[in-house]
Image (cartoon, grey):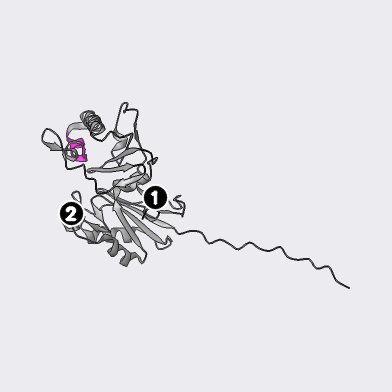
Amino acid sequence: MATNRKTKPRQKPTRRPGPRTLAIDIGGSGIKAMVLNHKGTPVTKRLRHPTPRTPRPRTVVDAICTMIPARVKFDRVSVGFPGVVTRGVVYTAVNLHPDWVGFDLARTLQRRLGKPVRVANDADIQGYGVIEGVGVELVLTLGTGLGSALFVDGCLVPNLELAHHPFRKRQTYEEQVGRAALDVVGKKRWNRRVLQMLDLLGRIINYRKAYLGGGNAKKLEGPLPRNVRVVSNEAGLLGGIALWHKH
């Protein structure tokens, strides 16, 4: 006679969580880092370390490796760098040190951290963190210098470098709205310059929307044009996930 046996319910196979990304943002005054899950959501608090006073490649790489606690687990690394970067190699670094030119940051960090590394311009990464992906969108980062990124229907226009183009009074955009200019002329005049910059770039590029990030964006006062908004500086980390989706 058959006995009734209780069959155990089949257990669903446990899904392995997706890869975690260590997002790093190298700036003229600070280096920031945060770990994101496979969806781009932060799973750690933001870490910050002052940029070394002499920001040569070796001292910056050492600072990055020192600031990441051993307990922090990640599978890959995204890095935002303030200059032109192609295939992980730095080609300009005006606000850091001349030794960066020609430096393979991706390969060096991959060797030090033991994980795959992708590097892009910091404004490009900021843009990936905030754009809507519709029409022409401009991203400007107001920090030690001026970062810029341009997107058309969500696609990046590579290697855009507006900072060192002539702007006004025989000076470049960076000379007029960078941190040094802010310190010299004060917030009121600096604010006017930023608005002039937005107006001029609006007539040149005809952007649908512009996004202002970077550490000094919070110092803007008064109304901005309707199609311009200030975004969180954390976008420079959150956008790092896109380097693994868009390449």
Q: Quadrant of residue 6?
A: bottom right
Q: Quadrant of residue 102?
A: bottom left
- Disc 1 from disc 2: Cα separation: 25 Å
- Which residue, as the protein is rendered here, is positioned at the far left? 170
Q: Residue at x 30, y 53 (%)?
A: 120
The local crowd at label 2, few if under 14, some if 14 to 19, many if 20 or more residues have their Cα within 10 Å, is few
Kindly check if marks 1 and 2 are in contact, taking CB atoms under 8 A apart as contact. no
Q: In this orientation, which residue lies closer to the viewer: 43 or 52?
A: 43
- Which residue, as the protein is rendered here, is positioned at the far top? 223
The local crowd at label 1, few if under 14, some if 14 to 19, many if 20 or more residues have their Cα within 10 Å, is some
Q: Secondary structure at mark 2?
A: loop
Q: In this orientation, which residue lies closer to the viewer: 124 or 188?
A: 124
Q: Position of residue 41 (x, y in %)?
A: 46, 49
Q: In this orientation, which residue lies closer to the viewer: 74 or 187?
A: 74
The reply, left or right, for residue 181 in relation to residue 81 is left
- Which residue, as the protein is rendered here, is positioned at the far right? 1
Is 137 above or below relative to 102? above
- The residue labelled by disc 1 is 46
The reply, left or right, for residue 184 in relation to residue 244 is left
The magenta-colored residue range is 177-184
Q: Amino acid at mark 1?
A: Arg
Quarter of the picture containing the N terminus is bottom right
Q: Amino acid at mark 2?
A: His
Give the main secondary structure of the magenta stretch: helix
Q: Position of residue 66 (x, y in %)?
A: 32, 60
Q: Position of residue 160 (x, y in %)?
A: 24, 45
Q: Residue at x 46, y 52 (%)?
A: 43
Q: Position of residue 27 (x, y in %)?
A: 27, 49
Image mark for residue 55: none
Quarter of the picture containing the C terminus is bottom left
Image mark for residue 97: 2
Q: Earlier in the sequence, mark 1 or mark 2?
A: 1
